[in-house]
Image (cartoon, rainbow, N blue to C red):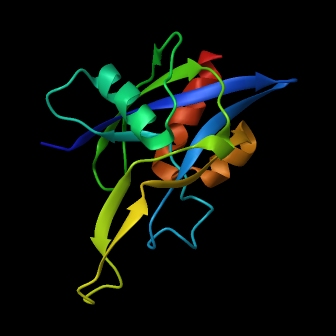
Amino acid sequence: MARESAGLLLYRRRLDRIEVFLIHPGGPLWARKDEGAWSIPKGEFTDEDPLEAARREFHEETGFAATGRFEPLEPIKQAGGKIVHAWAVEGDCDADAVVSNTFTMEWPPRSGHRRTFPEVDRAAWFALPQARGKILKSQRPLLDQLETLL
């Protein structure tokens, strides 16, 4: 069975455009990647309500609690086969104030040294056209669904 993740696509209205909130993965493997590397805040779940998992993951990865009307989007399949369940929700937060949980990995590889990194090293608001270039290619359909929804 495919692994599953749940996440939130937070959006806001600014002047005459829609902006979406995306996160950039932390750690050394993503440090020099920008275009096509950003994501919605999301994470894996197993025996949990997917929307509750999405809200929990949003909080763990950003430090913010998401509230509002959660609109379900059609699940997508990422390049690695993971199924992502997502909800669009209108809201706002300070991208510069993101506080993420951390993970530990051996770094540099085969060095025997374990280092701790933030799961998310930064977050930002992007207008939809710009977000299409920043977000992982397999998550672009979520932006299309949001645009249709609005």
Choose top left, top right, bottom left or bottom right for residue 58. Answer: top left
Tell me what residue is drawn at x 42 percent, y 54 percent: 119
Choose top left, top right, bottom left or bottom right for residue 7. Answer: top left
Foreground of the two, 81 or 57 = 57
Choose top left, top right, bottom left or bottom right for residue 33. Answer: bottom right
Indicate whether 39 appears above or below 7.
Answer: below
In this picture, residue 102 sits left or right of residue 47: right
The outermost residue toward the right is: 15
Indicate whether 4 appears above or below 101.
Answer: above
Which x, y percent locates residue 56? 36, 29
Indicate whether 47 appears above or below 135.
Answer: above
The number of numbered badges drawn on the structure is 0
Quarter placement of the C terminus: top right
Residue 140 visible to an observer of this rendering: yes
Which x, y percent locates residue 136? 51, 52
Tell me what residue is drawn at x 86 percent, y 23 percent: 16
Indicate whether 79 appears above or below 11.
Answer: below
Which x, y percent locates residue 38? 55, 52
Tell me what residue is drawn at x 21 percent, y 44 percent: 3
Residue 75 visible to an observer of this rendering: no
In this picture, residue 48 sits left or right of residue 80: left
The outermost residue toward the bottom is: 111
Quarter placement of the N terminus: top left
